[in-house]
Amino acid sequence: MALQLEAIVDALGGELHGDGGRMIERLAPLQSATAEALSFLSNPKFAKDLAASQAGCVIVSAPAEEAARLRGDYILTPDPYLYFARLTQLWKARHAPPEVERIHPSAVIHPTAQVDETARVGPLCVVERGARIGAQTVLKASVTVSENCVIGARCLLHPGVVIGADGFGLAPSSQGWVKIEQLGAVRIGDDVEIGANTCIDRGALDDTVIEDGVKLDNLIQIGHNVHVGRNTAMAACTGVAGSARIGANCTVGGAGMISGHLTLVDGVHVTAGTLVSRSILKPGHYTGFFPFDDNAAWEKNAATLRNLHALRERVKVLEKALARNDDKTS
Amino acid sequence: MALQLEAIVDALGGELHGDGGRMIERLAPLQSATAEALSFLSNPKFAKDLAASQAGCVIVSAPAEEAARLRGDYILTPDPYLYFARLTQLWKARHAPPEVERIHPSAVIHPTAQVDETARVGPLCVVERGARIGAQTVLKASVTVSENCVIGARCLLHPGVVIGADGFGLAPSSQGWVKIEQLGAVRIGDDVEIGANTCIDRGALDDTVIEDGVKLDNLIQIGHNVHVGRNTAMAACTGVAGSARIGANCTVGGAGMISGHLTLVDGVHVTAGTLVSRSILKPGHYTGFFPFDDNAAWEKNAATLRNLHALRERVKVLEKALARNDDKTS
Amino acid sequence: MALQLEAIVDALGGELHGDGGRMIERLAPLQSATAEALSFLSNPKFAKDLAASQAGCVIVSAPAEEAARLRGDYILTPDPYLYFARLTQLWKARHAPPEVERIHPSAVIHPTAQVDETARVGPLCVVERGARIGAQTVLKASVTVSENCVIGARCLLHPGVVIGADGFGLAPSSQGWVKIEQLGAVRIGDDVEIGANTCIDRGALDDTVIEDGVKLDNLIQIGHNVHVGRNTAMAACTGVAGSARIGANCTVGGAGMISGHLTLVDGVHVTAGTLVSRSILKPGHYTGFFPFDDNAAWEKNAATLRNLHALRERVKVLEKALARNDDKTS
């Protein structure tokens, strides 16, 4: 597997300073790159790795050009990380073995399901009654798309994804919980990626909706009737409870938890490990996790925290006492 | 798909005030309901939506009757949410296409497994040696029920559920971890629902037990030898560590975590995102998550929190100093 | 199913005090053991259960020998828990039905994949192009091993495990997220156990690496390019974000979360529910979760916590005022 530098620049653009005939045999991080590797510098904080790198060629932007020139071949581009992303796509496209089967014979597809003729369905997938899979969408192994759920174009669903299981709808009664049948479905837009073993539940009455360009990592739970806006991305182990409405261009860090029936406006960024228990109506960066410490220190602080309210009361008492003393001594 | 109002009231009871011949074409929330839709008001805080709703008919209880009468047809019932739950079941039963296969031909069922003749097993399920599946229980796609595990009657297991994988049992040794074979199984009662990709581990020696009427959402982990009491419900992403004993009629919010070897008595309610690290011996509502804030405010508070113990000491010093001063000035 | 005490001691060692001809019909905890059961005492805090146990024989170490002798037969060994672990293995080996199939006919194995002839592949597994499965490794049902991923010898992968789905790699652009193709793979060492529905992502350029003897529980997420050192164990629902480097002999409690690009040295122990947001360069025990309380107490403390920084400022003001007063009154 190899590509000439020239072929790369022909396909992706960028200004090549160096030997266009150089063969690139792999893509690698600066630190482990060898003379046959193409690497990139996107974060200025790794600039010191640039000088030391053995990479045959590096992708850089203007601020790093001088340092790149001193060490050898480079490609100049305004956004090296984006260039690198496109390069990985080029690399994969040139080196991937041809796919022979459009629909793996072990997949179970209901006769009423509509799978676009350019979509691919991997081994042991299930596509149920009335489901629709859009153009160029790929279901990897063991993906389940339940009744009447719709997946748009150019989506990628990783192994174990479950689309359209029942939402968690229960009414209490004197005889225990009574199931609320989930009569809605799931609608997923175009260019959506969904990570391994992630679950998106069908709606109770209306549909659960994932808009175009949303990216979900692994082991994420999306409850019934959630609405996730365009280009929002969520890291692994995140949970979004029922009927939450998350705006466009949001990000949620790993293991973030969004409570039900909330609204997050566009452009909200939630730190990993944060439980969002109220709506967020202003774009910004929100956080709420317990800062870890060595266990002994945590225990002392946690014990104090359990009486934090009392501590505040003690401070109040002190403030009053001092005010009294000030009166006396003034 | 449509049902006459009269047919609904015949099946489910309730007092119809309005046109029994009216055709209902869908069930819908108050806000998005149209004239062909039947809707409901269960939470008085949405009463303002009632007047504005375009629903052809609404399900209400006595306190909302007057408001409902002013806008048109309604069904009066003591518990509209429960009525609505039963209505979704009626709706589904009347409109679901007939199931043609009891056991999908792609399912892998061991010859020694016992699947009740009224149970249904979906595509690509695995039912292992000696497992038993009760009457009218439904396994959706890609469910695994491991050796000797028992599922009761009228249960519903969603795609990707894994019942009876090994519990996490390890003994340390000088050569690394030594596996403790998990010789127990899983016993699940009647009327249990288990969400997509949820895992219930087999016991080490005795069985893991899930009692009748328990409802588990998606992506939940139940460790070995856990015991979950009747009608307890857990929201998605919850984890219960080994040998925990959870009572009846408990609820655990999403991403709740219950440590191992604990006891929670009946009627304990754990808020989402809470780690329960000690037994709870009194029914009630328990919480413990870090309240989120904008990131800058969180950072300041978190930094102070890491020295909370020192702050308490400073308050103590102040209290003593003030007592001394009081002595002097008195 | 039964084993004579003598046969057990012949196989596993230990000093038998009692009747070697006694038939053991099951292994059981002290509390539920009957006369046909063999039990063990590993934790001195359960010593009171020893005297009361009905077990036919107990496994103990020297400190409990006298108490064991007073109640009947016992096996003396330096580490009863380790002995018990080996006993469960013996028990399972003697009682497990013979496995007839090495590779279940429903498994989908690519012609270029290499599955060792002593490995076993369960029903509905997928082993993709170029993947390799080592000697005596067992894939239970519905496991996915993606392209070019390598699993060592004597590993055990539970149902629903996904090895080698794409890591979560995205570059922002003015047209939304651009996918970074994940060109690395996953390399897993020997003697690794991976719990149900756990996911280990393939690397972006280099591989994700899990070293020998690592034990992962259920529903764990391991991001791309993570490196987990020998004999490290993680409990269920844990997440490790991309490029984190975790040392050998570490443990992570349930729902622990390790942020990306961090280093944890060997011998770090992270409590359940803790988010590790910075590198840990010193072995030890680290914790950070919000201590739960009854909801009313939590609400008061949480409200105060949101203004903790202000409380610290008030204490500072008091300290200054007091110092001033001291000056005046001195």
Image (cartoon, coloured by chain):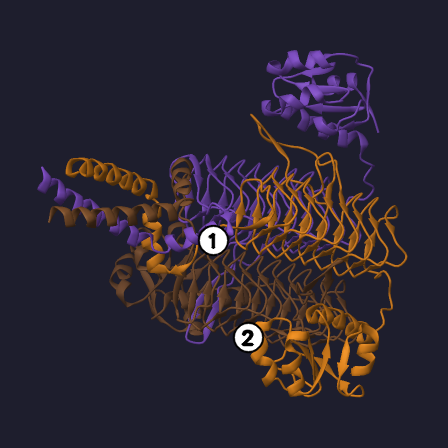
Chain colours: A brown, B orange, C purple
Q: Relative to B313, is C96 on the left or the right? A: right
The image quadrant that residue C155 belongs to is top right
Q: Position of residue B128 (x, y in %)?
A: 80, 47
Residue type at mark 2 is: Glu
Tell me the SS state at disc 2.
loop
Q: Which mark is residue A272?
A: none
For disc 1, the marked residue is C242
Height in image: B4 above or below C109? below
Q: Is residue B142 visible?
A: yes
Q: Relative to C71, is C195 on the left or the right? A: left
Q: Relative to A231, is A66 on the left or the right? A: left
Front one among A297 and A85:
A297
The furthest residue to the right: B117
Q: Is residue A48 visible?
A: no
The structure residue drawn at horizontal position 47% and vertical position 64%, both measured from the top left corner, is A278
Q: Residues within 10 Å of mark 1 (few under 14, many from 20)?
A: many
Tell me the SS state at disc 1.
loop
Q: Position of residue C114 (x, y in %)?
A: 67, 48
Height in image: C121 above or below B96? above
The structure residue drawn at horizontal position 33% and vertical position 59%, both measured from the top left corner, is B296
Residue type at mark 1 is: Gly
The structure residue drawn at horizontal position 49% and vertical position 36%, both measured from the top left corner, is C248
For disc 2, the marked residue is A211
